[in-house]
Structures are given as C-alpha cells and as structure tokens.
Amino acid sequence: MEEIKVKIRAFLSRFFRKHELKDNEDIFALGFVNSLFAMQLVMFLEKEFGIRVDNKDLDLNNFRTIDTITDLIISKKGE
C-alpha cells in the first residue's frame, strides 16, 4: 500500500509543487484540480497501476485524497 501512495504522491507533486500533500488532504478542497488535471490523473492511474477506471468509478470521492485513490486502486486490482 505504501508503494502505491509513493507513486501517487510523486505524480501529484508535479502539479502541487509548493504544497506537501498529506495522505488524507482533499485535493479538490485545496482548489488545485480542474477537468484537465482530473483526466490526467485517471490516465496516470490506469497506466501506472494497470487498472481500468470505469464510469461507475468516476465519483469525486474516489479521487479526493491519496488515501481514497489508494483504496480505489486496491479495490480495482482485487476485482
């Protein structure tokens, strides 16, 4: 699980250069996310972790924090 978080944090840090994200920090509440970023995040997750993010997974709550993104990846890999 920690390896997943490290990869997610590394990806996000390219966009949040001046902010050290905590695992439970809401990236939407911080105002850093736009629709282009959201698509880049989904494409990164699919490629990096070999998962498919389906329409039913496109709930903002799945992408709010490093913790929730990690949970989504783990659940997708378990399917």
Image: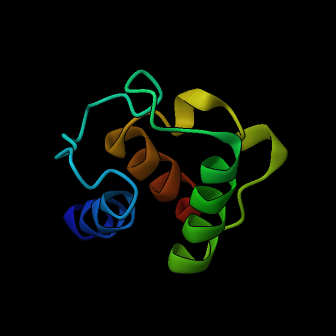
Give the tally of numbered discs.
0
Residue 52 visible in the displayed image? yes
Q: Residue at x 29, y 67 (%)?
A: 10
- Most distant residue in the front direction: 18
Q: In terms of depth relative to the viewer, which is nearer, 67 or 36?
A: 36
Q: Who's the residue at 57% across and 69% down the image?
A: 44
Q: Position of residue 64 (x, y in %)?
A: 46, 33
Residue 63 horizontal side relative to residue 56, left or right: left
Q: Is residue 79 visible?
A: no
Residue 40's spot in the image, x, y percent?
63, 61
Q: Quadrant of residue 30?
A: top left
The image's colour scheme reads rainbow
Relative to residue 44, is residue 7 drawn left or right?
left
Q: What is the quadrant of residue 29 in the picture?
A: top left
Report x, y in % for residue 57.
70, 42
Q: Quadrant of the N terminus?
A: bottom left
Q: Is residue 57 above or below residue 15?
A: above
- Report the residue at 54% width, 61% height from top: 78
Q: Residue at x 32, y 66 (%)?
A: 4
**Image coordinates for residue 51, horizontal then vertical, percent:** 63, 69
Looking at this view, is 45 or 1 the one in front?
A: 45
Q: Nearer the viewer, residue 29 or 4?
A: 29
With 25 as the anchor, is 58 left or right in this view? right
